[in-house]
Amino acid sequence: MRLHVADHPLIAHKLTVLRDERTESPTFRLLVDELVTLLAYEATRDVRVERVEVTTPVAPAVGVHLAAPRPVVVPILRAGLGMLEGMTRLLPTAEVGFLGMQRDERTLEAITYANRLPDDLTARQCYVLDPMLATGHTLEAAINYLLARGAQDVTAICLLAAPEGLRTLDQAIGERGDVTIVTAAVDERLDERAYIVPGLGDAGDRLYGVAG
């Protein structure tokens, strides 16, 4: 498993505003959208392309376009939905699948309650959207779900990550797939409720302004 922390002044600036408890939901949603687009730029550096010839108004030219099969973007419900538009803005031709996962607050394990994904993901590059990599259990379950369907190239985009979650993922995934985590920052630790410290609170609640 590889980790890429996107070190950019604009990413750091937007993340700082997201952390601020005074930032209200409309501004929070807008900043998440912008931040995800910046992270997606980093995450798609190795997206597969193939050569193509085009004709400009002046002369023929050789360039590239996205290779087939198309990438698959997989937001984890519900908070991952707040990251979808920022990702598809950069990859508008990607297919979109969904995974519904919820953390059991007693065991902290992830429970899968819905999925909308192709049965065969062989040779597909998959981009998982999950704002908070805390314990790592939700992302571990999601990546295992994709690997079981034939995916080998999986990139997870997270706003924040905790060291505990990164260790959990590294131990659980191992060398079974080409997995990369792209995040804006790795924070200090998890607290007793498994919240990232200093973090930014519950991303889903702050995105949508409701508890649940």
Image: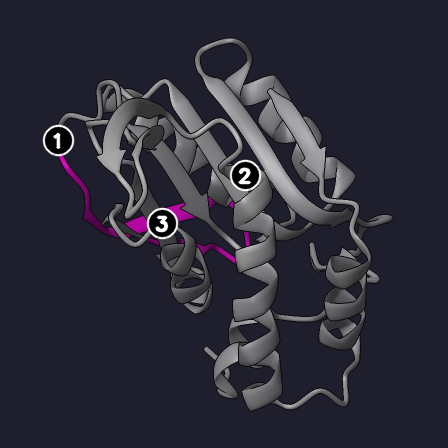
Q: Relative to residue 52, is residue 193 depicted above or below? A: below
**Which of the marked residues, 3 or 2, is nearer the chain's N terminus?**
2
Give the residue displayed 52% in from the left and 88% down from the top.
Answer: 209
In the rendered image, the quadrant that contains the N terminus is top right
Give the residue displayed 66% in from the left and 45% down from the top.
Answer: 183
Q: Measure the alpha-carbon separation of dots 1 and 3.
A: 22 Å
Q: Is mark 1 on a helix, strand or loop?
A: loop
Decide: few, some or many residues near mark 3? Use Cα within 10 Å; few <14, some 14-19, many ≥20: some
**Which of the marked residues, 2 or 1, is nearer the chain's N terminus?**
2
Q: In this view, does 76 lie to the left or right of 178?
A: left
21, 164: nearer the viewer: 21
Q: Measure the alpha-carbon separation of dots 3 and 2.
A: 11 Å
First to last magenta residue range: 100-118
**Amino acid type of the residue that numbered disc 1 sits on in the rendered structure:** Asp
Q: Which label number is shown at residue 119?
A: 1
Tell me which colouring the rendered structure shows. Answer: one colour
1, 202: nearer the viewer: 1
Residue ID for mark 3? 91
Residue ID for mark 2? 43
In the image, residue 16 lies at what x, y percent? 81, 70
Q: Relative to residue 103, is residue 204 depicted above or below? A: below
**Amino acid type of the residue that numbered disc 3 sits on in the rendered structure:** Leu
In the image, residue 132 lies at what x, y percent? 60, 54
